[in-house]
Amino acid sequence: MDWLADFPPGVLLLVVFLVVAVESLGVPLPGETVLIGATLLAASSGLNPVFVAAAAAGGAILGDSIGYWIGKRYGRRLLSVLNRRFPKHVGPKRLGAAVHLMRRWGPWAVFVGRFIAVLRIFSGPLAGMFRMTYPHFLVANAAGGIAWASLVVTVVTVLGSAATEFLHRFSWAALALAGAAAVVIAVVVVFRIRRRAAQPAADRAPVSMTEAELDELLSPSGSVPATTDADVRMDAPPTPADSAPVRTDLRAAIAVVLTPLRWALRTTPATTAFVAVFVALGVVTGGLWRPIDQAAWYPAFAYGVPSLEAGRWWTVLTGMFITADPLAYLIAIVAAAVFGGWVEVRFGTLRVSAIFVAGHLLGVLGALGAALALARLDWPWAQSLVTTLDVGPSCGILACVATATAFMRSPYRLRWRLLLLSWVSIALLYVGKIDDLEHFITTVVFVIVARLLLGEHRSTPRPTMRDWRLFAVSGLLVIGAVQLLVTLVPLDGPLGSTTLTQGSILDVGVDTIAILVIANWLRRGHRWAWWAAMVLTVGNLLVTLALIALAWLAQVPVVASTIWISASVLWVGQAVVLVLSRHAFRVAANQTRRRLPGAIGPGARRARAKAAQLLREHGGGPLAASALRPENRVFVTADGGHAVAYQQHAGVALALGEPIGDPGGAVAAVSAFATAAEQEGLTPAVFATRDARIVPEGWRVSPLGRDLVFDLSGADASEPAGPDDATGAIGADPTTSILLAARELPWELRSQIRALSSVWVSDRHVPELGLTVGSSIDAPDGDDREPTAVRVSVVTDAAGTVLAAVSWLPIPGAGGTVHGWALDAVRRALPDDDVGTAAGASAGAPSGEHTSRAVERALTDACRRFASEGAAMVSFAASGLAQDGTEPDGVAVRTMAGIAHRVDPLVGFAEIADVAERLSATAVPLFLACREDADQPRVAYAAAAGFLTGIRLRDLPGLSGSLLAR
């Protein structure tokens, strides 16, 4: 907790108050650790410990009170989500135990909970959930907070110096005791896990509770789940008959704990040896429990310009085996073991040793050379660098981290690299110590050259639309957080002090409020949020330029603090990200002057509501399931009897499928849509319609492709709906097939599906699909896609790895029923021949046959499930991309064929068609209609812009000519 030493006494008390308060809200922050560190600093700085205890008690009371009201207002909803997502951890038994505890002990549970780490976080929200009266809660909360803060401060104040002296005198004994305690704890944890696994499967199965059951459990008169016999057996002490299994499990637990040690010595000898030497030197020097930068021998081991000038060249090597403070020791031990071991397993001992040593030497020598060069500029920051000594292996560890990112799969590879580069850049900009310069040089170089160390070619990752949105909103949040941090703790970086002035305080406040307002909308991809972020970014840059120009022209010092100049560097990076990611923000489409009535504003909400009403009344075709996606606009006829879903790109109003409403008025609805579009100067067109007769007379109608419709009315739900048995043996590995609502997908499956999408889009350069398909599986929580009705069929192998995932959209029927289901998107695992070998391959990667059979099983099992639920039909190709084998007619249809050709490795149109044909599905032709041949190039670009995110006009010839190239 050395970072607390940088705070003045008043700010230190505020930090203690805020951290304890936020922890009490339910956020897992180290409140007690901060309190202990602040107490130790108070004892050494002359600050009265009573004030520290008062700040902690005040934060505990305030945080628990806010947590109480949050739990009372939103607790049931939160518990419902947690129980649905994590039934194993937040199931009826654990909830029942918590309810029983709160009902039996009431305020005493709140009081005692303040002294227990986990209950300290959740006691306030739990009390609110279980409707404890606030006066009783306040008394127990205040008493517990005051008693806890007073006890911690008193114990630390009395025993702090004694504990430090004990560590100094008995360092080896303390280290041995800590190691033994770690081993014992690990053995106990493994033993309990094995005993838990020995329970009957029925007792271990996670259970999800319905809303009614949860309300009954949390109601004042609700019943608590009874304790089962299995619970009694697990809680009771072992009987003599059970003693042998207990001893067996205990020996097995000890073997499990010691096995990783043997494995580490065998597979990661270099990492294990370095960590052992590093820890041993930490014990010998005392650096594990006290700073050593003031020791007399420190300059003989530390590297820096003074050491080189004094001829101590060996310090470049000796300095990487020690660190200056205990916190750095802990971080270095964990990072070296995790990342160094990871790289050593992948690359081998010799290569990881070379990477570690090269990264250390590059960072240290590069920083020293840069410091000497910059010192000639009479720069105060550079002058301070040439007088500083440093120690630590952080450069070598960062080299291993940067190398490890090279063989990560998308999207983690790109995200880790940006995280590393952002961290070292911000640290250099605002702190600017010699180690920050070392870290920056090492990270930048090894991120660039890491691919060369793999020994094989890996494609450069390409950000997906989700990645671009994440980068944009993360950049804003990072800028806001950094500005708030330097508000509390002024720093001296390369550009000067970030001490705030009245003007800069106002600027930071405005930026923070603006970021909080637009961040969530930016995450969802709204166009107006992108414009707001761009205005905020450009405004901050213009303010900084105006201040610099004023200071230069008037020959006066800059009025504001250098916080603006430092932040402007971050705003420049944010501007670059926003410009590059502009194609990812289309949810609120371009608000141009040429738009149909009801395209934006309140009219758009009324139009979407009317379309939803018409869908409930009349139903719709397979494309109607995607009509209300946020990317789409809705045109409603003057009489309100029909609605047309469309997208607007490049001056084209592209209608999707047939109008929603009475089929008898479809021709008039399309004519009204075309007339309204032409009045606004837009080019009307109709995409993927099943009836070519609904378009106005004289329009150019081209066969687009085909839809494959499987009639479920005659299917036998008791028999497999596909060519293979339901067991679907895929190779030699058993697989599991499930069909769930998209929002009910477990987190581990959802994260794997999102990762599959990123792998195909980033590494295989498969375009991201939109318009009518492609965005329902990996839509983030809270998105406006209304995915509650979307179903996802997932096939996993024995290890729980997703082999294939297929999403289905409901086809609305009359009266609000579900008439059938339309295939939306397919996500398949990357075959083993595409994953790569050596550094890039993952053990047990599926083969191409495995993934094909997994997709086949996902389709057939879903059809059988839909048939059993009473659905009438399944559409396998409503998107309009599936081709029928005929020669494309016109540039627009050739463009769609080119898109289908590019995404076929992921979707597998041929496999889907093969399954549909074996199911005796019927081929239904789809058409693309526009006014005349002269409209086709513009319509082709509009359709491509809807399907492919970030498409540019110069890419159109490549898509249109892809069939000829094939």
Image: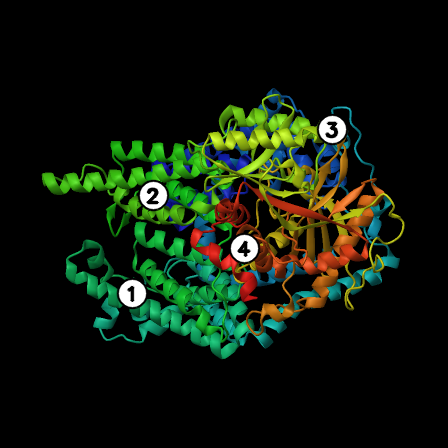
Q: Are marks 4 and 3 in contact (CB under 8 Å)?
A: no
Vertical order, 575 against 111 (above or below) = below
The residue at which mark 3 appears reads as 215
Residue type at the position of mark 4? Pro
Q: Residue 249, how many percent across, how many down?
A: 77, 62
Point out the tag, 4 or 1, that comes first from the N-terminus: 1
Instruction: Identify residue for label 4.
Output: 767
Taking 726 as reference, is 672 left or right? left
Q: Position of residue 838 (x, y in %)?
A: 57, 74
- The first of marks 4 and 3 along the sequence is 3
Between marks 3 and 2 in the image, the one whose residue lies nearer the viewer? 3
What's the distance in space between the residues labelled 4 and 3, CA to CA? Answer: 45 Å
Q: How many marks?
A: 4
Q: Are marks 2 and 4 in contact (CB under 8 Å)?
A: no
Q: Earlier in the sequence, mark 2 or mark 4?
A: 2
* Mark in front: 4 vs 1: 4
Residue 878 in view: no
Disc nearest the viewer among 4 and 3 = 4
Q: Residue furthest front?
A: 698
- Mark 2 → mark 4, Cα distance in angstroms: 60 Å
Which mark sits nearer the N-terminus, 1 or 3? 3
Query: Which of pointers 1 and 2 lies earlier in the amino acid sequence?
Result: 2
Where does label 2 land, which residue?
Answer: 45
**Residue type, label 3:** Asp
**Quarter of the image containing the C terminus?**
bottom right
Q: Residues within 10 Å of mark 2 (few under 14, many from 20)?
A: few
- The colour scheme used here is rainbow
> For residue 367, which numbered disc appears in the image?
1
Kindly check if marks 1 and 3 are in contact, taking CB atoms under 8 A apart as contact.
no
The amino acid type of the residue labelled 1 equals Ala
